Amino acid sequence: MTTLTMAKALNEALRQSLDTDPKVLLMGEDIGKLGGVFRITDGLQKDFGEERVIDTPLAESGIVGTAIGLALRGYRPVVEIQFDGFVFPAYDQIVTQLAKMHARALGKVKMPVTIRIPYAGGIGAVEHHSESPETLFAHIPGLKVVSPSNPQDAYWMLRQAIDCDDPVIFFEPKRRYWDKGEVDTEAIPGPLHKARVTRAGTDLTLAAYGPMVKVCMEAAAAAAKEGRSLEVVDLRSLSPMDFDTIQASVEKTRRLVIVHEAPVFLGTGAEIAARITERCFYHLEAPVLRVGGFHAPYPPARLEEEYLPGLDRVLDAVDRALAY
Amino acid sequence: MSVKSTAARRTTRGGAKRRGGEPELVQLLTPEGKRVEHSEYSIDLTPDELRGLYRDMVLTRRFDAEAITLQRQGELGLWASLLGQEAAQIGSGRATRPDDYVFPTYREHGVAWTRDVDPLNLLGMFRGVNHGGWDPNENNFHLYTIVIGSQTLHATGYAMGVAKDGADSAVIAYFGDGASSQGDVAEAFTFAAVYNAPVVFFCQNNQWAISEPTEKQSRVPIYQRSAGFGFPGVRVDGNDVLAVLAVTKAALERARTGQGPMLVEAFTYRMGAHTTTDDPTRYRADEEREQWELKDPILRLKTYLEAEGFADEEYYASIDKESDALAKRVRDGVRTMPNPDTMAIFENVYADGHALVDEERAQFAEYLASFADETEGH
Ligand SMILES: Cc1ncc(C[n+]2csc(CCOP(=O)(O)OP(=O)(O)O)c2C)c(N)n1
């Protein structure tokens, strides 16, 4: 057991994967000498060489397209997209090719490609550096979509994603890169797609993933001071999604608030609300509420504090749900 | 300002020839500040015009330095410095006419200067108060584009429109050596060639795309890339403001007269970090920078001005004074730049209004107002 930042935990997961499986390759812009703009690949090129830690040309469609070819040849490429907003030149390759290859080939070829994307806001960056496009990927059949919220999950989920024979879009909450936590690299991890109750409670369930789990934990702590007992579920995986864990929680608490940074409209929260309403209709004491981004472009840095769901907005939704 | 060029009428690839494997640069002013002639590109400027270019470069460098300082002081979230690229930007920018249209990336502060864009406007997005900050049509200078290569297609489409309108304006698209790898740039080249669009692709090859050297993007010199698409390319000494001006003028003139696109590769160097968040010591050697310092674009022109007796101490003193005033204006302007109103989040999402935005705006306003009630209640 060691204490690591999420960035270092991810670095360690990449290192272990490279070490364990000679077919694992890393590809991306500036991931070599620079170690990536967030230093997630720091030192890996030095230790594993340019053949396995590949600085690519500045071309995202090229990066993902060639990763598909390498996968067809038996490699397990782990691709780094520098920032969320820059995945779109590669979106065509991901959606029209990567996601469908296994099905089109009658299951005869596998696509063990992991695409790491630092995502979401809160770091005061310029345009295209703070977006939450996860729903756009979760909507695509054939892709798996996950997002860790802490260093321990970052380590194990990345290792599991790389081991997975399906394409996994691995969303890294960039504003949590520098948060520290205990990492046990020996413990046998739970399933990649299982949600986890990170705080037990009885009055209401908060469901979140990635960067918003911490906010929800803080909200639950704040609510506890007012005598309210909130349960927090860290979804961990968006596709597939572990509805059973959410259902079990809601059957206990009878109220659900879903929190994410991505725009609320047609977002992940909408899917959860619909499914949980279907599964738990007679248990619910209040409509399922959502807290998230607006139907507006991610704002300039000076407004992100107002834009991002924070403690107050989460607690406001909690109040509204409890008022029913 | 008169520029004579035979290249304006040429339709084949031209300008730079290979000698000993390395492509030759178009150069009109050597790094030592000596005026030389080139067989295809020439320029004839008055002392006044030469001093003008010097002033542009000095003020641009000063503006850039001030922005870096402001970033360090926390007034800007980020800055992309143009240090070392002044000649490439001023030379090419001064080659444009007011009716031409410019599509920049995010580092074209010197080009913006030549288009009379208020320097303060450039700082809004780096401060984090907006995503653009100016009306592109005011100076025919489009918004900065961060997604690499996207703007080369916009420039090409705009140029297609210019041609359709029968206008004789030209369009210039800026991009980096790294950007040349993007599919969008290849597609822009294809469209420009196929539709004979009046667009000049101006690549500032500053040798690095963050940590990756040009060799990680291309195994042929960038200017040769256009050949496969069917239009000419030329490499110019990007630290020689006279050569850049002459070559860009010729390329724009070529476009204007219906001869289609051209690629100009300005061979230059990014003296500083990629942006203020970058650490170049991780990937490049100090000696490289030191070598390029000897080719400094401003010093080179100054040496020439002095040798010709075109500028005296009094002149330099006046430029210094102007630089100080510009720096002060920028400093004061940034420090007093207001934060946007919270409700700006919902502004301009659509031109025509949208029920969902209206609903969310109203809900959010009500939510914010609830805090005001609370404080009043206490
Ligand atoms: C599509 C896309 N991918 C990645 C990035 C991140 N990024 C910003 S600038 C840059 C390097 C650009 O290099 P170059 O085109 O040579 O221009 P320079 O910055 O050197 O002027 C990268 C990788 C981006 N902005 N857009």
Image (spheres, coloured by chain):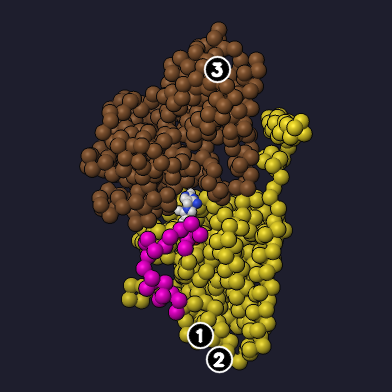
| Quadrant of res B167 | bottom right
Supply the letter of whichever chain is brown: A
Residue, disc 3: A203
Residue A263 in the figure: left or right of residue B239: right
The reply to whether callout 2 and callout 1 are in contact (CB within 8 Å) is yes
The residues colored magenta run B273-294
Spot occupied by residue B290 in the image (x, y as percentages of width and height): 41, 75
Q: Is mark 2 on a helix, strand or loop?
A: helix
Residue, disc 2: B307
Spot occupied by residue B298 in the image (x, y as percentages of width and height): 54, 78
Q: Which residue is drawn at 36% across and 37% down?
A: A182
Residue, disc 1: B33
Q: Separation of disc 2 and disc 1 at Cα?
A: 9 Å
Q: How crowded is mark 1: few (under 14 residues within 10 Å), some or many (20 or more)?
A: many
Say whether disc 2 or disc 1 marks the residue closer to the N-terminus.
1
Residue B45 in the figure: left or right of residue B41: right
Q: What residue type is labelled 3?
A: Asp
